[in-house]
Amino acid sequence: MVTLAVIAIAAIAVHRVATLFMPMADNGEKAYVYIDNDDDRDSVVAKLAPVAKASSMLTFRILAGMTGYYDNIRPGRYAINSGEGTLSVFRKMRNGSQEPVMLTIPSVRTTERLAHELSKHLMMSKGELLDALQDEEVCRKYGLDTLTVHCLFIPETYEVYWNISVDKLLDRMDSEQKRFWNDERTAKAEMAGMTKQEVVTLASIVDEETANNGEKPQVAGMYINRLKAGMPLQADPTVKYAWRRFDIKRIYHKLLAIDSPYNTYRYEGLPPGPIRIPSVAGIDAVLNHAKSNYLYMCAKEDFSGTHNFAATYSEHLKNAARYTAALNARGIK
């Protein structure tokens, strides 16, 4: 009887040791577990259970109990790779060896939307990030204000940790935008007589005017000509931004009455900040704007998304008449 008991105990021990190295994931596919700051013993187990085998969960709980893991739970995004053993996963979670997130900065129009989109991929809440972006003191740390804070974000993809803090995220974005503004780009901005913030602001208008990257330098050049001539930009996208009505198809005269610094029909010069986070193509279009004598532009009547440009107002009126007729023919209001 003693021999059988010893054999049984030994068999259980061998099996338990074996589970240390057996694949932890139940379906054999890569899975992720997200551990928050407020997670405890029960919530960690609850998050692991849907993706782990029952035998692996028992082994994990034994390891956690033996090492005091539940007293020092480290938040983060942890990968359970296909075929990865329970011991390996446990070590990662105990040591805080999380897998980074590939975070793409979206080219969005509002700070609210930016906070919403980024918070979907990070542990921070939308409210936490939005509060920081709307805090003048926080923005001042980066040489910006709440109207220019979009200049902090270059819409590319970055590798960050899921549990990165708001402060560290903004510091990282500041480092990235400084890297983006290399000597060449900085020199081109100076040659154009513009600050970096002004370049980004104009780029945001250019991006709203056209999605055609090939046309963007021409659009940028036309607006720069207007700035130099002391003419109002009269950019329709800035009026939409002033109203926060981005679905407007036609800018009627009554919409131009809004008293907003973003209404470039009413106020000369650039608006006080970007009307969206511009694309890299938009920024580079401003820095490499086309040289021309164009002062006017109007969407083409073929609805191709490109524009007819004009150097004189009379020529512009002809272009505008064709576009208006096309809108009316399609019943677009």
Image (cartoon, rainbow, N blue to C red):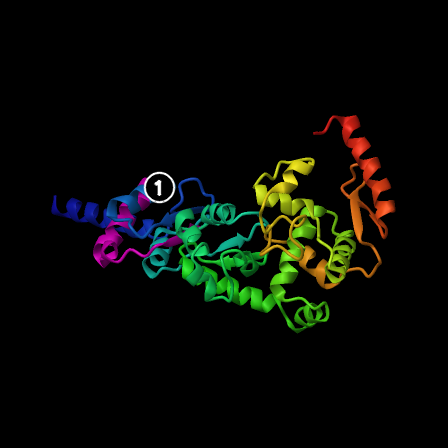
- Using the image as rendered, state which of residue 247 and residue 81 is in the foreground: 247
Q: x%, y% of residue 141?
A: 45, 66
Which residue does the numbered mark 1 point to in the structure image? 53
At 28% from the left and 44% from the top, the residue drawn is 43
Res. 326 image quadrant:
top right
The residue at 80%/45% (across/down) is 307
Name the residue type under label 1.
Lys
For residue 269, side relative to residue 50 (left or right) = right
Q: Is residue 154 visible?
A: yes
When the figure is inspected, residue 137 is found, relative to residue 307, above or below; the finding is below
Residue 195 at x, y = what percent?
Answer: 63, 67
Q: Which residues are magenta?
A: 54-80
Quarter the N terminus occupies:
top left
Query: What secondary structure is marked by label 1?
Result: loop
Q: Crowdedness of circle 1 by 10 Å Cα count: few (<14), some, many (20+)?
A: some
- Chief SS of the magenta region: helix
Residue 180 is one of the magenta-drawn residues: no
Query: What quarter of the picture does the C terminus occupy?
Result: top right
Give the number of marks: 1
Residue 163 point in image, percent of width and height? 40, 55
The residue drawn where x is 84% and y is 59% is 292
Instruction: Please give left or right for residue 33 compared with residue 278 in the image.
Output: left
Q: Is residue 77 within the magenta segment?
A: yes
- Foreground pick, 321 / 72: 321
**Residue 29, above or below 87:** above
Judge from the rendering whether residue 215 lies leftward or rightward of residue 119; answer left or right.
right
Image coordinates for residue 65, horizontal then vertical, percent: 22, 53
Residue 84 shows up from this direction: no
Between 86 and 301, the one nearer to me in the picture: 301
